[in-house]
Image (tube, rainbow, N blue to C red):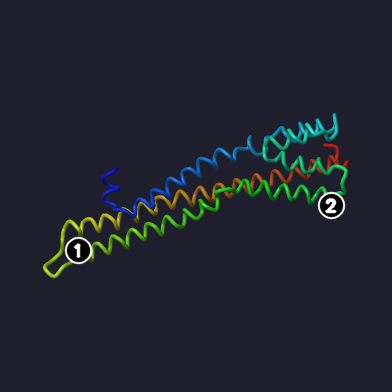
Amino acid sequence: MFAIIEAAGWPIWLIILASVTALAIIIERFWSLRASAIAPSGLLDDTIRRFRAQGVTQDLLDTLYRGPLIGRIFCAALANESSPREVMKDAVEDAGRAVALELERFLGLLGTIATVATLLGLFGTIVGMIEIFGSQTASGSNPSQLAHGISVALYNTLFGIGVAIPAVIFHRHFRGRVDMLVVQMEGQAIRLVEIVRGERRA
């Protein structure tokens, strides 16, 4: 493996850095975007049960805020229980936007890596081409320099595309996952608001 990196020349280190960063983001997002960490299925029913049994208490608000991310939206709704519907709705929307930003954390960087990795591969290709042309002299060509230039050009193109493809795939996957979670949270938040306002029973 080290022989390949050596043959690819110094531009490959930029691609390796991009690939390590992308891998770290992918692992972190897989862990952070679990349903159990964002919007566990039983949290809404448990919140409704506690609200009906005790009303809005500081313990309930603290528990919701420190729990899964959707708990922050529930906390915003319950904290404004006695406010007009529009105030409660605005509080829920503000909390929802903050949670959505949390869900999208690092996705912009992953999308940037998906684009930049291809450009880094092209950059390495150009460096290799420069070495190829530099191997040509009046008395002929330097075979070792020519071979190294070809290696730099081809390996960087290969690795650049190899990093960009999975980065694009996972970026789109996580975007879809975030969109799905946001829709689920919106539905649960609306249900909680309507129950708190007495507009529905369950």
Note whether 38 is above or below 50 in the view shown.
below
Residue at the (15%, 64%) spot, across then down: 141
Instruction: Give SS at disc 1.
Output: loop
Q: For this view, does 57 lie left or right of residue 19?
A: right
Mark 2–mark 1 Cα distance, whole angstroms, equals: 72 Å
Q: Which residue lies furthest to the bottom in this view?
A: 138
Q: Residue at x 78, y 48 (%)?
A: 91
Which residue sits furthest left?
Answer: 139
Give left or right: position of 59 versus 27: right
Where in the figure is residue 9, as x and y percent of width and height?
29, 53
Q: Residue at x 46, y 57 (%)?
A: 115
Residue density around tag 2, few if under 14, some if 14–19, many if 20 or more, within 10 Å: few
Q: Which residue is painted at 58% across and 39% down in the image?
A: 32
Task: Residue 61: give x, y in percent of width and height.
Answer: 77, 36
Which mark, residue 135? 1
Seen in the picture, residue 174 relative to 39 is either above or below; the reply is below
Q: Quadrant of the N terminus?
A: top left
Residue bearing mark 2: 86
In the drawing, does residue 141 fall left or right of residue 130?
Answer: left
- Amino acid under label 2? Glu
In the displayed structure image, the side of residue 81 where residue 160 appears, left or right: left
Q: Which amino acid does label 1 sit on?
A: Ser
Residue 59, quarter of picture: top right
Element at label 2: helix
Q: Foreground residue, 85 or 168? A: 85
